[in-house]
Amino acid sequence: MNSRVIAVIPARLGSERMPGKVLYTLAGKTLLQHTYEHACRVKSLSAVYIATDSEKIAEIAAGFGAPTIMTSATCRCGSDRVAEAARKLPGEIIVNIQADEPFLPAEAVEKPLAVMMKDHRIGCATAATRIRKKEELYDTNVVKVVCSSSGEALYFSRSLIPFPRVYFNENNLTRTRQVIFYKHIGVYLFRRKMLLTFNRLDCSPLEKVEKLEQLRLLENGYPVKVVIIKKDSPCVDTLTDLQKLENNKRKTGPNGIQA
């Protein structure tokens, strides 16, 4: 069995909320380049590729040294694009790193990977971290997740889940004990067989409603292992998100934006 672990970053120009998002710049580099360079720092990855249907993205990626795999323009979601690229690549575990996670911490890949290596029954794993900011609770761009006692996802949603009927201090979430909220981090680790199975499945009803591809697995009875990590990963869904990261850079200096 080929035990190599390969990452694929799906990238397209047609983002619904922020067209051309991956080519917006932050600290002098595109979001795509930040994502690629952070992925390359993850020691457990054998290789990192960018998968796209855009010649423009492929040209820009070549400019910063990223290998690119051209895919069709009809991919339904990022993981479908990764699956198409994976058919041309070796590797038993394929990691989908979403291109709007420019500062993905290494533990978001390494901790789920360690869990998968210990339990070969796990076909798909992902990462989540505790929500620490009040505004993230009600931000529909921040995907929340609730899990079973064994760490498998029960549901992902853009809404606040669980909905608290108990008192909690939304202004001091790190001290809250009654209920803990978790946000999903934009990374999926698939065993090759599971990724290709995902790609063969029809888009599911809840996937279409929430616009969350991982629900395709849950709706078809395939478990998703969720591994809790400590570090957050600021993703970019809007121009406001991008401005916040730029402001953080100005406050902390040239080395202020780190994983």
Image (cartoon, rainbow, N blue to C red):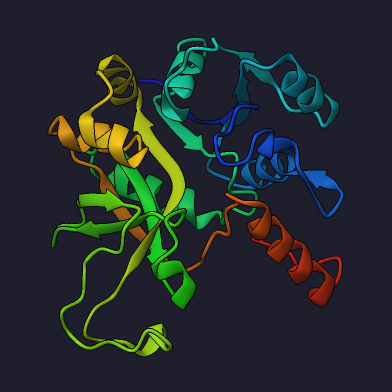
Q: Nearer the viewer, residue 106 or 84?
A: 84
Q: Nearer the viewer, residue 161 or 201?
A: 161
Horizontal side of 17 relative to 35 (left or right) equals: left
Which residue is located at x 42 percent, y 28 percent? 79
The part of the image, by quadrant, that contains residue 45 is top right
Image spot of residue 164 (x, y percent): 20, 76
Q: Nearer the viewer, residue 113 or 145?
A: 145
Which residue is located at x 55 percent, y 54 percent? 106
Measured along the vertical axis of the image, is residue 222 above or below residue 85?
A: below
Image spot of residue 108 (x, y percent): 47, 53
Horizontal side of 81 relative to 63 (left or right) equals: left
User: Is any part of residue 121 visible from this angle?
Assistant: no
Image spot of residue 223 (x, y percent): 19, 40
Q: Quadrant of the N terminus?
A: top left
Which residue is located at x 31 percent, y 49 percent? 115
The part of the image, by quadrant, that contains residue 248 is bottom right
Horizontal side of 212 relative to 46 (left or right) equals: left
Image spot of residue 246 (x, y percent): 77, 62
The part of the image, by quadrant, that contains residue 77 is top left
User: Is any part of residue 119 visible from this angle?
Assistant: yes
